[in-house]
Amino acid sequence: NVEASNNYQDIQDPAITVRFRLMDDLGLGGPVHVLAWTTTPWTLPENLALCVGPDIVYEVIKDAATQDRYLLASERIAEYYKSADLYTSLARFSGRELVGKTYQPLLPYFAAQPNAFRILADAYVSTGDGTGVVHMAPAYGEDDYRICRREGIDLVDPLDEQCRFTSLLPEYEGQFCKDADKAIIRRLKDEGKLFFQTTLVHSYPFDYRTDTPLIYRAIDAWYVKIEDLRDKMADDNETITWVPEAVGRNRFGNWLRDARDWNISRNRYWGSCLPVWISEDGSDMICVGSIAELEKLSGVKVTDLHKHFLDEIEITLGGKRYRRTPEVLDCWFESGSMPYGQKHYPFENTQWFEANFPADFIAEALDQTRAWFYYLLVLSTALFGKPAFKNVIVNGIVLAEDGSKMSKSKNNYPDPVKILNEIGADPLRAYLIDSPLVRAEPLRFSEAGLKEIVRTVVLPYWNALSFFTTYAIVDGFRPGHAKERPVPDRPELDRFILSGLASLVRDVHREMEGYRLYNVVPRLTGFIDVLTNWYIRLSRRRFWKSDDDADKADAYASLYEVLVTFAKVMAPFMPFLSEYVYQHLVRPIDDAAPASVHFCDYPEIDSGRIDADLEDRMAIVRSIVSLGRKLRDDKKLKVRQPLASLTVVSRDRAVVAAARATTSLIAFELNVKRVETSEDEASFCTLNIKPNFQSLRARAAPKLKPIGEALKRWGFAEVADLEQGKTIDVEGVALSVSDVLLTRVPAAGAVVASSGAVMVVLDPELTPDLVDEGLARELISVLQQARKTAGLEVSDRIRVRYASTDLDVLSAIERHQKSIADEVLAVELVQGEGAEPAELNARPVRYSIAKV
């Protein structure tokens, strides 16, 4: 039962060991009692057999205190007798030698049961707990039922539908079975049949709705014979694409290999009635295939398919009267029938169904490997000889932040309405798609994770839209401007972002077609980062300060295309934000466009736009810039402070070529006057190379020491080979870059940072000229913030007055007056009394601005 398997609780139950008197003294000249252990005393009145393991060694011992003889597994004696002085060993038997021995019924209720009260043997018996002898009540245990049925022992069941004892056990009549434990234990003790009593904490299944313990019980039921379908289902499973693959191949595949016959009937009121009418003498049955057929067979108009109506309908055929079997269908039979039931097939929609079956994909949680996924496959294999779905995405379970199951009673989850109102549906959707859930792993739900999506995707994209619309409104931009050039003729930066967009579309297509949702959001996040922190930042001046109309038109056209296409790409993942962008960028200027982004065709792959070399080169440049910024941070050098030089060092010619081709870009990004390149790493650092024990231990443990010695002799040439993806044989072991731990140690006085094949060396020395320029740039930043605070438009001109007691500040402003005025759109920049205090690199200045 799927529901039961997911709702176990640790509870305390009695654990008792009971004496069963053998009819045979085993040649020992006196009575022998078999000891059997159970945690369900309420099943002892229904005991019909004892079971031993055929290869287990059993021993008859004599209790030193009572002189009673007891039979139990040799391995379990120490659990009851802590010292060998407390008993004497009399004889040993294998389980096989005990088979067929009979014993006195423990309680009198079913003493006349045929073939009962014998010792049986089965390999399932173990010596892990108890006595090595199992008490068998075939109505209340799977193995009990199997073994007793094999031995010709019919079950007895003195419980009613509420699991209360009936009049077959008059002393306990009306009691819920588990509530009778205490009275039964007391009786066994009074009759001298209780050998030992304790309690045990163990895991037990509970009804997840009523939180009451479930009772294992054998009942008459209807089954689908799975064994005949098992091999075909396993073959069908090989044709299904599982995401993740391991779930289908392992978890689901193992479940199929061990699948048992399926009990499809339930003894409940609510449910779809089993359409089987059985003759009163039990000799025949009719399976009714439709309402029309039932009406024809019974002569009754069928208007209600509920149990209370159908149970009243009788069929008379061939002189026999037939009544419906009282059971209803297992709800999973209905779930498994969904592909057919939803279209009322085969009574209607035959052509549509046959054209659309099996489904392209389904998606559900990991626990459905034993439920919906399984039952869909059972029925489709039985009916059509093929699976009901081609692809399946298996998701994990959402847990509370502490890893526990979310529960309404515990209130251990955030308010979903609050999440939607304060953070939004789009971040929630993207957060879940980007989580372990879509890899069939559990997710500890965290509001911090939602906010991270807002920080890395929503806000940057929103800022990009805001940036574009702000300048587009000022310049009256409309797509298709006359000065807009074809993409191949546009600046490299535009070609780069459009190539990246085309690569994004290609990658999203590939991952979505492979149903790998978990690979999509990281790709979207990466593109947003490139768009906002690289393309827009580097292009900012082109929108508001460019004197080249064609260049500005190219920038507008490129960014517009990126924002609109990206909205379409992102629409399935962040539908509301995408719709907002579409409505603000497309609909106002194109009435003929689809009314919604979700009515648009998904972007197609345009391979001609992809320039892999350009993207690789720009990736190298971004790596260089990232390392340069790290060095600035380490040395606490503000980005606005110009520096003399940066040297890019690498033995990889592609790195050097990329740096040489983009020196002006690198210089602008890192605010350095000069960018140089070098392939001579030895002039700037030394190498420290060690084996990666974690990577190598499993395959090269005996050779780690000589490998370590060999690595000490390595130089820059070997490292360069590894960083370019090559392998090097050392002591018969092929080493890749992940097999070594590499550290570049800066030469004395050098300021160095490295990542892979890229190393940058920064000159941190500040000359007076550099300091002056840094002060000027600080003032530009202060004035730009003042413009923003004053609510000025980006095109508004201003007048600036400034004052300072620091002569260096005044000198710096005087020397760089023109560049400051150009940057802040100042028509006047004069020394005088300033109202607002500020600091430029910890130097005082006062200023005031006024709109012209």
Image (spheres, rainbow, N blue to C red):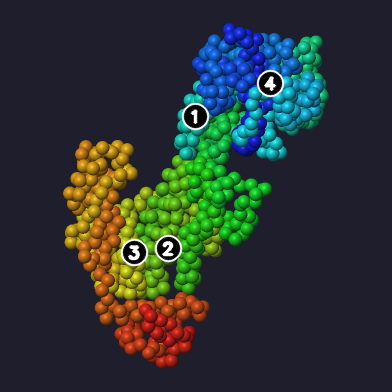
Q: Is residue 330 above or below residue 517?
A: above
Tell me the SS state at disc 1: helix
Kindly indicate the quadrant of the structure image that contains residue 137: top right
Query: What residue is shown with label 2?
Result: 532
Q: Earlier in the sequence, mark 2 or mark 3?
A: 2
Rounded to the nearest angstrom, the CA distance separating label 4 from label 3 is 80 Å
Give amino acid for label 2: Thr
Tell me the SS state at disc 4: loop
Q: Residues within 10 Å of mark 2 (few under 14, many from 20)?
A: some
Kindly indicate the quadrant of the structure image that contains residue 140: top right
Q: Earlier in the sequence, mark 2 or mark 1?
A: 1
Tell me the SS state at disc 3: helix
Place of residue 212 in the rendered image (x, y in percent of width and height, measured from the top left): 70, 36
Whether residue 74 can be seen here: yes
Residue drawn at point x = 73 percent, y = 23 percent? 190
Query: What residue is shown with label 3?
Result: 630
Furthest-bottom residue in this view? 832
Judge left or right: residue 288 versus residue 585: right
Rounded to the nearest angstrom, the CA distance separating label 2 from label 3 is 19 Å
Rounded to the nearest angstrom, the CA distance separating label 4 from label 2 is 81 Å
Between 287 and 717, the one lying in front of the other is 717
Disc number for residue 253: 1
Place of residue 106 in the rendered image (x, y in percent of width and height, measured from the top left): 70, 17
Judge left or right: residue 566 versus residue 539: right
